[in-house]
Image (tube, rainbow, N blue to C red):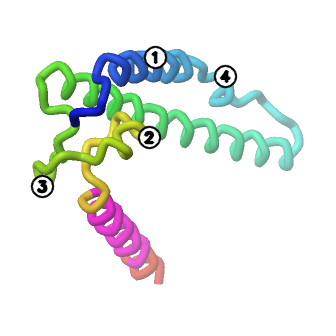
Amino acid sequence: MNGIDLAALQSALEAKCKGLHSRMLDREDIFIEAAADEFDRMQQRLTREVAISKLDRGSNLLKDVKAALNRIADGSFGTCLSCEEDIAEKRLRAVPWAAYCVGCQEQLDRKRAQNSSNRDNDADDLAA
């Protein structure tokens, strides 16, 4: 991590945190107005689901950004939480809130995808 400017990354993370926090406060799309038309109600439900999904992703990203700021504060920033090897500087510049090296992140993503697929199959089995 010789070439990384921690102060600049910390500043970028703090700005990201502030931006995410302000977006989390905007929940206007979640409110559903009464609509007489069924098509309008369906459209409003879809809009609400998209807004809730965005809030959920934003909330998760905010947690990741805050965790990265905590890792900077405690001196563990740039170390993979799984294998404890250094995270590549290129990755940290691109995704400063990254908690895992590319290899460990790929393994984690595959496990999550497999678990999601298993849950979908379980739901299909229950519905049958």
Query: Where does residue 108 sit, x and y in percent of width and height?
Result: 28, 60
Instruction: Give the foreground label among 1 and 4.
Output: 1
Q: Label 3 sits on what residue type?
A: Cys
| Residue 102 in the image: above or below residue 56 | below
- Tag 2 and tag 4, C-beta contact below 8 Å: no
The residue indicated by pointer 4 is 28
Structural distance between the alpha carbons of marks 4 and 3: 42 Å
Q: Residue furthest front?
A: 3
User: Is residue 41 found left or right of 102 in the rendered image?
Assistant: right
Examine the image and state in which quarter residue 109 appears. Answer: bottom left
| Residue 126 in the image: above or below residue 9 | below
* Depth order, front residue of 75/42: 75
- Tag 3 and tag 2, C-beta contact below 8 Å: no
* Depth order, front residue of 99/118: 99
Q: Label 1 sits on what residue type?
A: Ala
Compare marks 2 and 4 and give the one earlier in the sequence.
Answer: 4
Magenta residues span: 105-121
- At horizontal 42% and vertical 21% (from top left) the residue drawn is 12
Query: Where does residue 79 sit, x and y in percent of width and height?
Result: 17, 42
Secondary structure under the numbered disc 2 in the rendered image? helix
Q: Label 2 sits on what residue type?
A: Ala
Q: Which mark is residue 94?
A: 2
Secondary structure under the numbered disc 3 in the rendered image? loop
| Residue 84 in the image: above or below residue 107 | above
Q: Which mark is residue 15?
A: 1
- At horizontal 29% and vertical 33% (from top left) the residue drawn is 3
Q: Residues within 10 Å of mark 4 (few under 14, many from 20)?
A: few
The residue indicated by pointer 3 is 83
Structural distance between the alpha carbons of marks 1 and 4: 23 Å
Q: Can residue 107 be found in the magenta stretch?
A: yes
